Image: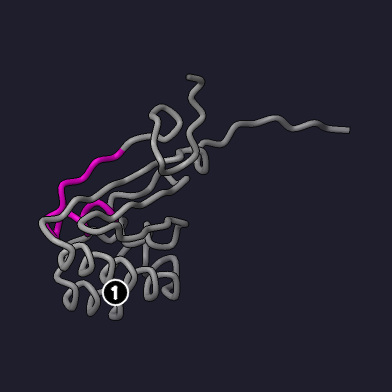
Amino acid sequence: MKIWNSYGSEHSANLVIIGTFKDTERAADAIRVLDRFSEVVPNQSPVAAGSYYSNEVLALLQECRVSLAPKEIEDFVYEHHWRQDGKRIVITTEESEYSALINTMLSRGAKVEVFSAHQHDTPYGRSTRNS
C-alpha cells in the first residue's frame, strides 16, 4: 500500500477582491464585461485561451474595450464568484489566478482591494481567524 501526502495551494487562496466604482452604472458595466468573458472563454480551446487570441476572444476584447494579455484570458476558465453591491463588485475565489478580473475592473475605473479572508474579518469569503 502506498500513502500519498501532498499539499496543493491552487484552491486554498480564499481571496476577496472588491472593486469600488464612481457609480452603480460603471459597476454594472464591469459585471457585464466579466459575465461576457466567463461565457465566451470556457468555450475556447486551451491553446487559444493560453497562448494567443482566438478570433472570438479578440472580438470580445474589442467589443468590451479591455486590454488583457493572452495568458490572462485563461483566468476566466477558473471558478470565481462575483456580485454587484451598489457601487461595488465583490469577487470571491479560491484561485490564485485573478489578474484578468482586476484589470477588467480597473478598465472601468475601479479602485481595487485584494485580501485573504483567511487573515481578515470580513462578511465575504470564509474567515478562519481565531479571535
Which stretch did the figure color magenta?
100-114
In magenta segment, residue 113: yes
In magenta segment, residue 111: yes
In this rendering, the answer to whether 18 lies above or below 48 is: above
| Label 1 CA crowd tier, 10 Å (few <14, some 14–19, many 20+) | some
* Residue sitting at x 33%, y 70%: 37
From the top left corner, tell me how far across and down residue 95 is, in percent: 44, 46
In this rendering, the answer to whether 63 lies above or below 1 is: below
* Residue sitting at x 38%, y 62%: 76
Pick whichever, 121 or 35, lies toward us: 121
* Residue sitting at x 24%, y 54%: 88
Q: Which residue is mark 1?
A: 57
Residue farthest top in this picture = 131
Q: Could you say which quadrant of the image residue 61 lies in?
A: bottom left
Q: Could you say which quadrant of the image residue 45 lies in?
A: bottom left
Q: Is residue 82 left or right of residue 109?
A: right
From the top left corner, tell me how far across and down residue 18 is, in percent: 28, 47
